[in-house]
Each structure stands twice: as C-alpha cells, then as structure tokens.
Image (spheres, rainbow, N blue to C red):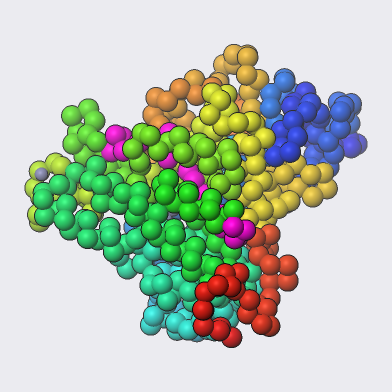
Amino acid sequence: MSTYDVVIKNGIICTASDFYPADIGIIGEKIAAICDYIDPVHGGEIIDAEGGIVTPGGIDAHVHVDEPMKLLGDVADTMGEATRSAVAGGTTTIIAFASQDLSLTGPRALSQSVKNTIDMYSEQRLYCDYGLHLILARLEGTGTATKDILDQQLGNVYEDCGVSSLKVFMTYPGLQMSDYNLLNAMYASRKNGITTMIHAENGDIVRWMTESLEGQGLLEPYYHGVSRPTIVEGEATNRAVTLAQTMDNPILFVHVSSPEAINTIRRAQTAGLKVYAETCPQYALLSDQDTKCAHGDNFAGAKNVCSPPLRPEEVKQAIWRGMNNGSFTIVGSDHCAYLYSSKAKGKHNAFEKCDRGRFRYIPNGMPGVCTRLPLLFDAVMRNKLNSFMKFVEINCTNPAKVYGCYPQKGALLPGSSDADIVIWYPNDKEYAFKPKVITNDLLEHACDYTPFEGVEIKNWPRFTIARGKVVYKEGKLMHDNATGQYIRRKKTSLSYPNNEWPSEWRPIYTKCNSPVIQ
Ligand code: URP
Ligand code: ZN
Ligand code: ZN
Ligand code: ZN
C-alpha cells in the first residue's frame, strides 16, 4: 500500500508566500505532505513536474454562465462548459452568479433563487468546483424592500446555501440601484458578514451620453466606450466608498478599469477603510482600439464590448501598477461569453439598417475564464507582473480569502487544502503540446472567438489537478475525472470578527453628521 495516492516530484512550489523546490504528496482529495523529498516508492501515481512551477489552482471569482434567470441574456457557456474551459487554463474553482428570481416572494425567496441555480447545474458534468454569488436585481416590489427583511433574507441565503457575497449594480437599465437601496444592501450585508461586490458606473451619465451619441448618429461598437468614459466609473466608485463608509461595510469593486477609480480605491485603503478591488486581464492587455472595425467588418469591435469598457492604451500601465502595489486585491476574468451571432443583436434594428450596428443593444461581455491564468503567468515572464508569488496571491489565494473558501482553496497547505494544483511547463524545454499562441480551439469554451486570438504566450498549464484528480493533461481533458461540486463558502475574512452589528453604531467617519442607524 502506498502512503500517497499521487506524488508530484521535481516541481518548484510557488505559493503567495514561498518559492522553493519540493515534492507534494496527495491522499484522496487533499494535500497531505510537502517535503524536500518524497521517495517515489511511497506514491501510487507519480507525476514528474520536470522542474516546472507548481501553483495552487486558480480561483476565478467572476464568471457568468447560463443560469435559470438569464439576467444577462443568452450567454454561450453552461456551468459544465465554463468549468471545462476553466481547467484547460489552470483554474480549479470558479465563482459564478445566481440572480434573484423576481417571481419569488417570502423570506426565503433569495435563497430559493440560489437553490434553483444549483439544481440546474447538478445535471451537468463539472470539471471543477464552483460557488455562487447572489445578484440582487431589484428591491422594490419584491418583498425585500426594507433593510430588515433584506437582512433576514441574506441570513437565510448564507444559512441555506453558503453564499457569502452579493453583487449590486450602479448602472444597467433595470438593474441600477438608487443610493438608498445600495445603503439597504450594504446594511444587510454588513449585518450578515457578507461581502458586497459593486459594479461601479454612473448609470445616469451612461444613459445621457448614449442618447447624445445616438442623436449624432455615432452608433458603432466603439462608441459604447465613449458613452462611459473613465470618470463615469470614478464618480460611482467615489460614491460607493462614501456609502460603504456610512454603513461601516466592507466592499469589493469588481472589474475596475479606470485610473480615477483606482485612485479613489487607493485613497480609501490608505485611510484604513475595508475597500477591496478586482481587475481583469482585458483591462491590462487590450484597449479601446480593439473595439474598432477589423478585417472590413464594421461590427467586429462588438466582440470586445464590455462594461466597464476597454480603455485608452495609456490606462494599461495604471492597471499593472495597481496589481503590483496591492490596490487590486484580486484578478477575475469577468468571463461573460456571447457567440458573435448573439452580439449581432446590436446590429440591425428600426433605426439603423446598415452594418455599423447600434452599440446600446450589444450584449456586454467577453470570454476569459481559460486565458486569465496563462496571460498573467506570461506577464510575470515579461516583467509586467512583479513575481510568481504575486501571480498566485492575486489569482488564487486572495480570491479564496475574500470570498470565504481559504484555505480549502487558494493554497497548498498540507491537511487543509484540497489538492487543486497546476503544474506549469518547465520554461526552457519544448514539448509536443506547449502552446506558443492563443487560439480559440485551445480554450474549450462554447464561444466562437477569443479576444486574445493570436496573442503570443510563454507558458500554459501542463497538468491541472482538481481534488487530487488530473482533469487536464498536456492539452487533453480527462472527462472521467470531472467530479466538480458546489462549494458552500464561509463568512469572509473581510468581515468583522463576530459578524455582528455593534450594539452602538460606530461610523468610521466620525466627522459627518450621519443619522443614527439602529
Ligand atoms: O460587460 C460585462 N462586464 N458583462 C458582464 C456583466 C457584468 O457587469 O459583470
Ligand atoms: Zn458588472
Ligand atoms: Zn461580470
Ligand atoms: Zn449604419
């Protein structure tokens, strides 16, 4: 009988804090040992890393997949397809979204929305584990309008489903929340130790700008970005910080792309506020030029239409700086894939008959769950990202910490962590399968394009191991080992020690004359 089911030999272990050569012993689904040397006789199966870097599996905490509510329309990937694409790029946990079902009422309406989503995915073959954030779509008229009812509902969502995070929107017609309702959401999150994720763009400015651009006949995909410049994100970010400060509530800004927003976040962090932020590879690597026409197709830029939009070239530097200096806590992909034919919903319509389209109707989002890790690993090799430890910190460890699944996920801790591991190729050796450029067929998603087609890449996951089983090996999926599960998450390390609303409300910002909240 072997001591370990699997032994990974000759790798360089890289975590958020360490970089050293060692062997890993796996028993069942868990990491059991990390030692200088494990004698191969103790291993059932031996995987030779041949000097490659060995990291925890990635956690992509921002992934949109098909869900019962279809809040974002017809996205291309099922949960099965998204997890398949995830492991092909070294990600072993994704956190997707369960949207509030507006037809449900009662104290467990929100938790039923999440349960229905989990039920839908239970039918699918999953290549890695997943969790769910709740999307709060609307408060008025849903029986969740008051802060106390919402407080109770969120308590139930946590208790019933292990959901410890919530996304709210400051833009998008139908989803945009008033400041009053943002305060209600933050109040209830604060009371339950739930992390409030914020999509910060000023929806009223976007609306005004969109109408103005349409009035001038400026309709192509490129003008989507013009309708929501960086200050639109800056304003909303600043406002959300103020609201969070008023509520003494930790917040996390998702998909941050604007220098004004980064500066606000940095200032809030310096002031000691519990303000966290996520950015995405597309904001560091693509630009607004990628939303212009290509290959004679005036609508091609629609593939890269997302919100917040891709920014002018010079903004990229600020994104890399924010990753390196800690302003960004995490990197997520914001994978939200639409077939090019679905993007074309933004094309012909009553007002516009030619092929320029009308940007208002283009579904927002692009695929990225597979490419996130390889692109950022590559960024270390190109000296844009400071170190491999930083790579692990922002892509694996911090997402697990902020979303309440550490150290089960995001770490290589013997006895505690699931054996979710990526073995990268040794940098200096050639292999039969070691991609040099990104192509769509590498990505195993259901989308018909990648914004990173043709981009040169210096490394790729060689083995992806999920809960002790190899699910991806040298370009091939191991379908029989696909046994991903739903994971309940804990209250997060962003929240307060006992997650209790203090008996006496204590605003951090004591100089303001806030009304007393009971
Ligand atoms: O354009 C984007 N980001 N689509 C996904 C939805 C969202 O706001 O995250
Ligand atoms: Zn968003
Ligand atoms: Zn998103
Ligand atoms: Zn036209």
State the extent of the magenta-drawn residues as a range: 271-291
Across and down, in percent, residue 515 comes to 51, 83
Examine the rendered structure and indicate whether residue 265 appears above or below residue 114: above
Q: Is residue 480 visible?
A: no
Examine the rendered structure and indicate whether residue 175 appears above or below residue 483: below
* Residue under the point 18% across and 29% down: 296
Examine the rendered structure and indicate whether residue 118 appears above or below residue 229: below
In front of the other: 428 or 70: 428
* Residue under the point 59% across and 44% down: 326
Q: Quadrant of ligand 2?
A: bottom left
Q: Is residue 273 magenta?
A: yes
Q: Quadrant of residue 222?
A: top left
* Residue occupying the far front of the picture: 511
Q: Quadrant of residue 420?
A: top right
Q: Is residue 147 left or right of residue 326?
A: left
Across and down, in percent, residue 316 comes to 43, 36
Q: Is residue 209 left or right of residue 180?
A: left
In front of the other: 473 or 12: 12
Across and down, in percent, residue 197 comes to 51, 60
Q: Is residue 506 magenta?
A: no
Q: Quadrant where the C terminus lies?
A: bottom right
In front of the other: 229 or 92: 229
* Residue under the point 31% across and 35% down: 290
